[in-house]
Amino acid sequence: MALDPETFDALIDTVRRFVAERLRPLEGEVEANDAVPDAVLAEMREMGLFGLSIAEEYGGLGLTMLEEAKVAIEMGRTTPAFRSAFGTNVGIGSQGLVMAGSDEQKAHWLPRIASGEIVTSFALTEPDVGSDSGAVKTRAVKDGDTYRLSGTKRYITNADKADLFTVMARTGDDPGARGVSAFLVPRDLPGVSIGEPEKKMGQKGAKVADVNFDDVPVPAANRLGAEGEGFKIAMRVLDRGRLHISAVCVGVAERLIADCVAYATERKQFGKAIADHQLIQGMIADMKTEALAARALVLETAAAKDARKDVVMESAAAKYFASEMVGRAADKAVQIFGGAGYIADYGIERLYRDVRLFRIYEGTSQIQQIIIARETIRRGG
C-alpha cells in the first residue's frame, strides 16, 4: 500500500531537511573517521529509514517502488555512506526474505530488520565470482535438518556490522544458476567470521569486507524458497536494487548541479561570474539534461514495477544510464570548480570518488548492457 499523498509529502520533507541540516554538515567527519556517527544511525532508525520497503504489518513503512525511489533521490544529495547505512536493510539485504521468505521467516526477521535492530547483508560475490553470479562456489551440503555451509564471500556491504546474511550457495551438482540456493545465515552461528574492512577509493563510512563460512550449521528452515531457486531470487532482488541505486545516482547528480550553479555564480574570471561564460553553461546544460532524463527513466520504471510489469530491461537501462550519467556529472563538476574541485575542502573530489562505485555494484555497466540487449532482442525491438 502506498502512503497517502499528505503523509508521503511529509516524509519527503522530513528526509530533505534531515539531509540538508543534519547530514551534509557531517560529511567531512564521516570522510575523516570512515564511520557514520552512532547518533545519526539512531535518528535514522527513529525515522523508519531502515524499513522503507518492508510492509507495515512487519513494522516498516511499506513504500511502493516509486515512493522508495523518491526517498532515495533525496538521500542521494549527501555522501552515499549515510544511505548505505540502511540501504541493505531496505534493498538487497532484506528483499530476498520479502520476496521468497515463508510466513514464519518473515515474522521472525522482518520486524527487527525494519526497526534497524539488526542489519542485513547480501552475500553473493566471491573471490573468483563477480559478474558471473551463477558460478558461485560456496557450498551448502544437506545433513539431515541442517546444511553445512562453507566458502568465502567478498566485498560484502555492511558485513562489518551485519547480523544476518542472505547467502547464495551451491546445493547440488547442477551446473550454473540451477544449482544455487539462498539461505538466511545469522552472524552468530559457529563458523561465521568477518574479515577486516577493505580500504576503498571512496564512499568512506560504508564498509565492505570478506565473510567466511567454515562448515557453518545452517538450519534447513533458513533456506529461502526451494533448492535451486537462489539465482532466481538473487536476480529479482537485484532488479529492485538497481532501481534504488539509479535513484541515488539521480540525487547525487542533482546535488552536484546545485553545487556547481552556486559556485559558478559566485566565482569570477575575466571580469564576470564564470556562470556567464558559455562553455561553463554548456557543461551545466549537459549535466541538467542528463539528470532530468535519468530521473524520468527511474520514476517511470519504478511506477511500472509497482504496476507489476516486466521491468528487467528497464531496470538495467536505468542503472546503466543513471550510474554513467552521475560519473559524467561529477567529472564536469570538478572541471567547473577547477583547482577547488580537486581540493578536499569543497567536497567535489569526494563525490567524484564516491560515484565511481555506482558503475560497478548491483551489476557493472557491461552486465547492464548485456541485459538490455538480451531483453530488447527477446522482445523483438
Image (spheres, rainbow, N blue to C red):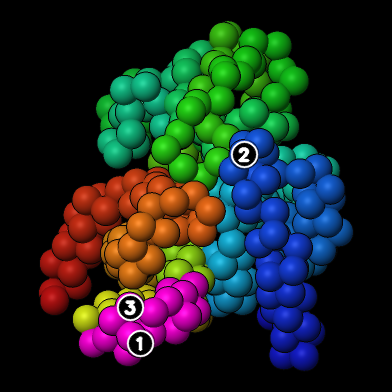
Decide: marks 1, 3 in contact (CB < 8 A)? yes
Which residue matches tag 1?
Answer: 272
Where residue 41 appears, x then y in whole percent? 78, 49
Above or below for 352 versus 376: above
Classify mark 2: helix, strand or loop. helix
Where residue 346 appears, x then y in whole percent? 51, 59
Which residue matches tag 3?
Answer: 269
Above or below for 339 versus 121: below
The stretch of residues the image draws in magenta is 259-278
Instruction: Name the residue type under label 1.
Output: Lys
Decide: marks 1, 2 in contact (CB < 8 A)? no
Q: Residues within 10 Å of mark 3 (few under 14, many from 20)?
A: few
The kind of secondary structure the magenta stretch mainly shows is: helix
Place residue 213 in its image quadrant: top right
Q: Residue at x 51, y 22 (%)?
A: 210
Q: Nearer the viewer, mark 1 or mark 2?
A: 1
